Amino acid sequence: MEQSNSNNPMKSPIIQEIIISNRIGIICEEISRRMNIEPIKALKLFYESRTCADLHDKSTGLYLYGNLYVADEFMREREGL
């Protein structure tokens, strides 16, 4: 029998927020490494970025891409500043 989405715990907004928070940590660690800055500085820069807004906006589809791709997008955004 097929399970409906309403019974799928992975569809829970709380679980989705935990997943995106974990991903952001991984993305910011990569940004920190690439830019040779402290992870907390990378986190601040990422949260202020268009890339972060796009990651949270389901309509952009960015959330479907891997963490390294998102880090690449952030770096491209920074190069355009």
Image (cartoon, rainbow, N blue to C red):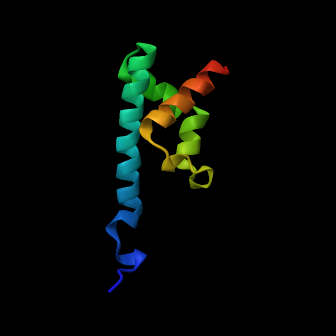
Rendered-image quadrant of the C terminus: top right
Residue that sits furthest to the right in the current view: 80
- State the count of labels: 0
Does 62 sit above or below residue 7?
Answer: above
Residue 61 appears in the figure = yes
The image quadrant of residue 29 is top left
Does 59 sit above or below residue 26?
Answer: below
State the residue at coordinates (50%, 36%). Answer: 70
Q: Position of residue 8 (x, y in %)?
A: 35, 72
Q: Position of residue 36 (x, y in %)?
A: 41, 13
State the residue at coordinates (57%, 41%). Answer: 53
The image quadrant of residue 13 is bottom left
Whether residue 7 sits left or right of residue 76 in the image: it is left
Residue that sits furthest to the top in the current view: 36
Q: Position of residue 39 (x, y in %)?
A: 37, 23
Rendered-image quadrant of the N terminus: bottom left
**Considering depth in this image, is 75 or 19 the residue closer to the camera?**
75
Residue 48 appears in the figure = no
Does 6 sit above or below residue 70?
Answer: below
State the residue at coordinates (56%, 54%). Answer: 58
State the residue at coordinates (44%, 33%). Answer: 68
Q: Position of residue 17 (x, y in %)?
A: 40, 52
